[in-house]
């Protein structure tokens, strides 16, 4: 058995003065890449995912021991444990890439890949959903207490692989905006039907600090128009100088097929009254250029942050598929986005 422990999200809590870091632990049955490929090829569970958190009081120089995040009862799995089957099967989830402090004084961390038995119309189906962990600083105990939200989920007919890779932001009116990835395809044998929804971005809103969530619906333009998007992650980022909330992701002119195509990559301003995207602000960051790019180009795997000194948005992205010889022969690029 192989395993990997990866930091997925970090945020600063102004209430405690601590920095929080959220970790993703994956156990694999078989060699790493081969085990992952076998799962997506056959649906066999060759990997088990769990989430952890830790905190730092010295800006990341030292960290507390990782503690597991749990949404159900069962045996706790330490990061250095040799896991039992029961530990592997309990509290499975795939970590999100964003964590935020809220005006309520809490920390919100959304996590996907949460198994959930969805009951609709007298039928039952096991889907992968999202839950949000809500942390509050306990001054007396000098640690955080955590509560977990209700599950956010849709049937396979809406998203064949459930809801994944959530990004979250607090809107100006205090509501929480959770945006999620879906897919038009499924992994057999989990489900063998056909999705009825084309590729969309999915979202839900919370009015009680992340504890309960509105029914999931597709993200649209402020005009009410729908748009297409492949199965990729996106990012929400509030700019400190403009005060505006921005969405970054892939919008395609035609319905996607699962993960593809993963271009172009755009940025748009969020209309927070909806929430929705302001169509007149959609701007292409990068696109597919057939004369120079390979046919499998992916503009979808990036990290981004705001430069505190300049106010520019810095994005770092590997243009997988830019070389037609092999999609993994690719360069990483720095993009600088200036918001006006």
Image: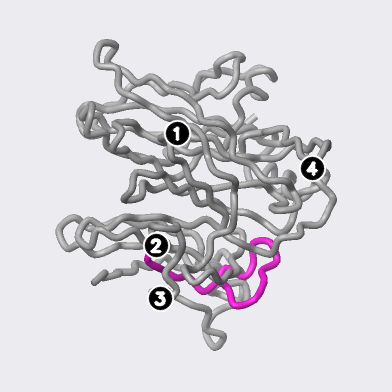
What coloring was used for the rendering?
Answer: one colour
Dot placed on the residue nearer the N-terminal end, 2 or 1: 1
Return the mark for residue 190: 4
Q: What secondary structure is the magenta-colored segment mainly?
A: loop
- Residue receiving disc 3: 283
Residue 208: percent from left, percent from top: 43, 35
Can residue 285 be found in the magenta stretch?
no
Residue at 71% x, 60% y is 197
Callout 3 crowding tier (Cα within 10 Å): few <14, some 14–19, many ≥20: some
Viewer-nearest of labels 4 and 2? 2
1 and 3 marks in contact (CB < 8 Å): no
In the displayed orientation, state which residue is furthest to the bottom.
291
In the depicted view, which residue is nearer to us: 38 or 141? 141
**Quadrant in which the C terminus appears:** bottom left
Callout 1 crowding tier (Cα within 10 Å): few <14, some 14–19, many ≥20: many
Dot placed on the residue nearer the N-terminal end, 1 or 4: 1
- Residue receiving disc 1: 23
Chain part drawn in magenta: 252-270
Query: Relative to 69, is 163 on the left or the right?
Result: right
- Residue receiving disc 2: 270
Marks 4/2: CA distance? 35 Å
Q: Secondary structure at mark 3?
A: strand
């Amino acid at each position: 058995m192989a395993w990997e422990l990866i930091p997925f999200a970090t945020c600063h809590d102004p209430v405690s003065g601590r920095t929080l870091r959220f970790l993703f632990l994956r156990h694999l049955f078989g060699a790493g890449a081969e085990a992952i490929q076998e799962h997506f090829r056959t649906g066999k569970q060759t990997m088990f995912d769990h989430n952890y958190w830790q905190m730092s009081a010295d800006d990341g120089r030292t960290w507390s021991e990782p503690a597991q995040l749990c949404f159900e009862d069962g045996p706790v799995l330490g990061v250095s444990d040799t896991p039992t089957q029961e530990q592997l099967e309990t509290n499975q989830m795939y970590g999100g890439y964003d964590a935020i402090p809220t005006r309520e004084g809490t920390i919100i961390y959304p996590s996907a890949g949460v198994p959930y038995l969805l009951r609709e119309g007298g039928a039952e189906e096991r889907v992968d959903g999202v839950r949000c962990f809500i942390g509050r600083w306990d001054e007396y105990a000098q640690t955080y207490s955590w509560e977990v939200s209700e599950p956010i989920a849709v049937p396979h007919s809406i998203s064949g692989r459930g809801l994944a890779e959530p990004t979250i932001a607090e809107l100006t009116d205090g509501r929480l905006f959770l945006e999620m990835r879906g897919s038009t395809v499924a992994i057999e044998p989990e489900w063998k039907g056909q999705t009825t929804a084309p590729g969309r971005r999915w979202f839900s809103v919370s009015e009680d600090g992340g504890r309960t969530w509105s029914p999931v619906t597709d993200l649209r333009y402020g005009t009410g128009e729908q748009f297409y998007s492949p199965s990729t992650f996106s990012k929400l980022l509030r700019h400190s100088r403009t005060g505006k909330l921005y969405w970054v992701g892939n919008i395609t002119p035609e319905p996607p097929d699962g993960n593809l195509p993963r271009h172009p990559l755009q940025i748009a301003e969020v209309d927070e009254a909806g929430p929705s995207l302001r169509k007149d602000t959609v701007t292409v960051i990068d696109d597919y250029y057939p004369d120079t790019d390979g046919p499998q180009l992916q503009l979808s795997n990036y990290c981004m942050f705001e430069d505190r000194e300049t106010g520019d948005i810095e994005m770092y992205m590997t243009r997988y598929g830019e070389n037609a010889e092999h999609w993994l022969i690719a360069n990483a690029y720095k993009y600088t986005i200036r918001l006006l």
